[in-house]
Amino acid sequence: MIDIDKWTEIYSTVKRHKMRTALTAFGVFWGIFMLVLLLGAGKGLENGIMKNFDVAKNAVFVWTQRTSVPHKGLKAGRFIQLTNDDMAAIKAGVPEVEVLAPRSQLNGDFTVSRGTKSSSFTVNGEHPEMIKVIALQMLTGRFINNHDIKEKRKIAVIGPRVQEVLFGKDSDPIGEYINIKGSYFLVVGTFTPKSSDEDGQHDAQVIYIPLTTLQQTFNQVNKVGYMALTPKPGIPAKVAEEKVKTLLMQRHQVAPQDLKAFGSANIEEEFKDIQGLFTGIALFSWWVSIGTIVAGIVGVGNIMLIVVKERTKEIGIRKALGATPWSVISMIIQESVVITGLAGYVGLLAGTGLIAGIDYGMTKYKVEAGFFGNPEINVTIALTAVIVLVVAGTIAGLVPATKAARVNPVVALRDE
């Protein structure tokens, strides 16, 4: 049941000290506003980075380098060449690996042409499993499949920049042929990178052909440039990475202590570091905002102490007429909660509105801001902010309310 008298008293108190109340409540408003703004901006940064995260989050890339330690009569400085046999050995000997995608690149100076149009592009020999690792979005046609690998078909999947240069931006290249270093390849698909960063711009200029076709057509028989892999669910990428490298060391007569023979990049570890950064940003945002809110609480608490002082005689009369300590405490705390709650709620609305406006503008006008994506505030944060407001209001009024409850009616009636 709503107590009209209490709400009238609260309104009367605020009305009598409008400027003082507004200035004090601003601290709470600003704390909540900054909390929402900082957390929203942090989420925008996370969205932007995740949008440009163009590989599987648990992917591992492994490549060869030169040995640095002599082993079994073999000198240091020996270059190691990955082969199709290595891929078969990994599939058979490392059960922790779920996806294994070997890749090679066509080296040397060459141009890709169609009719009178030509340009230099990157040509990769791919395995069908690679699309499970890299972030590609097929636009038309299809990607490389197992039949292409088995039959060594001369087919190609091209990026948007390749399509634009050789065919025209709005043309349909499916079913057309392109000339790669003297060999004709049938275009069976087009793709676009999911990321818009520098890597995405590079991927837009790539042509994918079957790995076995590249090996046979361009004299790279049985050669693999490097590999990408992902572990099975529940298995850390680090485990699969170490077992693969250990197996390759054994197969290529590399000393176990030679850490330079094989290079690798563990995307899962990098992703964990990025997640830790986002957690740190969120904690920093909470720390700054809570500090501002605490300053606001102190201000509200001071106001309530002044209110108690001004209403000492009134509180004495209430207690003389039988008011319980709890009724006096609840009266003061209610006023405190209303001030902090109202100020914080306005701050919450202002912050959420600003974040929503930025998100709407970026979506509507397709704004690309590098590593900053669409900012957002989730429901959990909004509910947490509401809880913070209630707790802040209670804390702000607790000391003044306790002081009011201890007022001696006799002494209070003599107060001038």
Image (cartoon, rainbow, N blue to C red):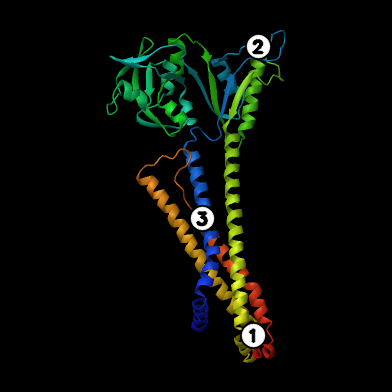
Residue at 60% x, 83% y is: 311
Q: Position of residue 216 (x, y in %)?
A: 45, 10
Residue marked by disc 2: 77
Dividing the picture into quarters, in which one does residue 73 lie? Answer: top right
Q: Nearer the viewer, residue 229 or 339?
A: 339
Residue at 43% x, 34% y is: 196
Please report contact status of discs 1 and 3: CB closer than 8 Å, yes or no: no
Q: Count neighbours of disc 1 (C-alpha within 10 A) and say few if under 14, some if 14 to 19, many if 20 or more.
A: few
**Mark 3 or mark 2: which comes first in sequence?**
3
- Above-or-below relation of 382 to 307: above
Relative to 154, is 270 on the left or the right?
Answer: right
Residue 27 in view of the camera: yes
Mark 3 or 2: the one toward you? 3
Relative to 243, is 55 on the left or the right?
Answer: left
Residue marked by disc 1: 324
Q: Which amino acid, mark 1?
A: Thr
Residue at 44% x, 17% y is: 150
Relative to 100, is 120 on the left or the right?
Answer: left
Residue marked by disc 3: 36
Residue at 61% x, 71% y is: 301
